[in-house]
Amino acid sequence: MSPFHSNIATLRHPEPQSTARAPVRPVFLPFAGCPYRCMYCAQDDQTGIHAGAIAPGDLKRELALEFRTRDKPVELAFYGGTFTAIPGELMQAYLDIAASLKKAGLVARVRCSTRPDCLDSQTLDRLARSGVDMVEVGVQSFDDAVLAASGRGYDGVAALRGCEAVHAAGLELGIQLLPGLPAMTPGIFTHDVFATASLAPSVARLYPLLVLEKTPLADKWRAGAFAPWAVEDTVNALAGALPVLWKAGVRVIRTGLAPETDLDAAYLAGPRHPAMGQRVRSLALQRLLEPTLLSIPGPVRLEYPRRFQGELWGHCGELAPAYARLGLHRENTVPHGPPWDGNLFVMSQLPDSAPTR
């Protein structure tokens, strides 16, 4: 940094840095084990799998073919249903396949997804003994009124206890939240985020609620009985959630549903944007930097990790005006690659000849 710079301030980005992990190989089991169909759920359209849960024998053959050409182990992930509520013998058949592949070194890790009210100690012990590493819990919300309005069939206490049971079994915890559920406000979502952070999960997913065809929620929407959150409100709420989770050591591995052809066809309404993740992360970053930028008088120079280059200015540069008001302009920013600290942002005052606020 040049010696004439004064008023130097630093900020360390709070997002936990990911370690090298095996690629995830999903096994989608749409609605398998689900006690009933949730009012918003269309797992077949969300995953593109319409044939139902794959039979264990077919899965074993399918994976055997794949592993002939794979040169690195994967993380096997059972998604799309309530895994811990699948009938015992069938669930064990899936677990046995995963365990045998793990023993052979072809699978590095195993995870599954389920509901918080389907997590008794006996089942969790079975998962642990079978080599499962992580249980992702579809909490959706910890608020009693929201859970009741959404017909989830459990309350906030049950949601908390389910997550705690995963920890007690010695398994890694993942939590999924659904901002925008019926009766949910941004304030309730913020409470859900802090509740999630307090449970110290390894990962979290934030899936803004969408109205999809062929769901009870679509009927409510058509009748005018439900209004989804707007895109901008959703981006604002999720951008507030990220730093809370990051500072608690939680990796946020998804914001918004992944693109899927069948999902595109089923989509009716709700906060959907092709760059939702980028917009949320960019706004969260801008809010993290703002207090420090405001503390530096005059125009500012910013040096930052190159990995944030695609997020700094926002989607299509939408945050450039906000940064300009804070005294930061593109020409006064310098991205750095290794060995620069991957989380370190350095801000300093520029001479008066630089662009001013």
Image (tube, rainbow, N blue to C red):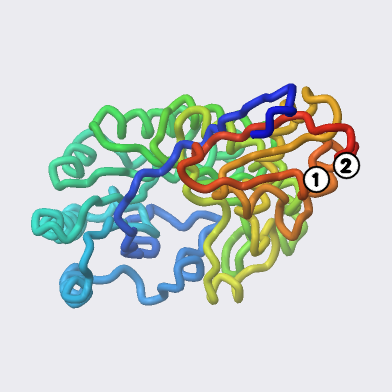
Q: Earlier in the sequence, mark 2 or mark 1?
A: 1
**Residue at 64 percent of width and 32 percent of height:** 346
Q: Can residue 230 be seen at all in this image of the molecule? A: yes
Q: Amino acid under label 2?
A: Pro
**Closest to the observer, 85 or 46:** 46
> In the figure, is residue 180 to the left or right of 203?
right
Q: Is residue 286 above or below residue 264?
A: above
Bin the neighbour count of mark 2 within 10 Å (Cα to Cα): few under 14, some 14-19, many 20 and up: some
> In the figure, is residue 297 to the left or right of 186?
right
Bin the neighbour count of mark 1 within 10 Å (Cα to Cα): few under 14, some 14-19, many 20 and up: many
- Image location (x, y in percent) of residue 216: 59, 60
Q: Amino acid under label 1?
A: His
Q: Is residue 180 above or below residue 250?
A: below
Dots 2 and 1: beta carbons under 8 Å?
Answer: yes
Give the structural element (helix, strand or loop) at label 1: strand
Indicate the quadrant where residue 286 lies. Answer: top right
Q: Can residue 189 be seen at all in this image of the molecule? A: no
**Residue at 57 percent of width and 69 percent of height:** 214
Q: Is residue 151 above or below residue 246?
A: below
- Image location (x, y in percent) of residue 47: 45, 67
**Closest to the observer, 178 or 213:** 178
**Closest to the observer, 56 or 14:** 14
> In the figure, is residue 263 to the left or right of 153?
right
Check the picture and name the quadrant holding the C terminus.
top right
3D distance between C-alphas at marks 2 and 1: 7 Å
Q: Kindly identify which residue carries mark 1.
A: 329
**Residue at 31 percent of width and 34 percent of height:** 166
Q: Kindly identify which residue carries mark 2.
A: 355
* Outermost front residue: 3
Check the picture and name the quadrant holding the N terminus.
top right
Give the structural element (helix, strand or loop) at label 2: loop
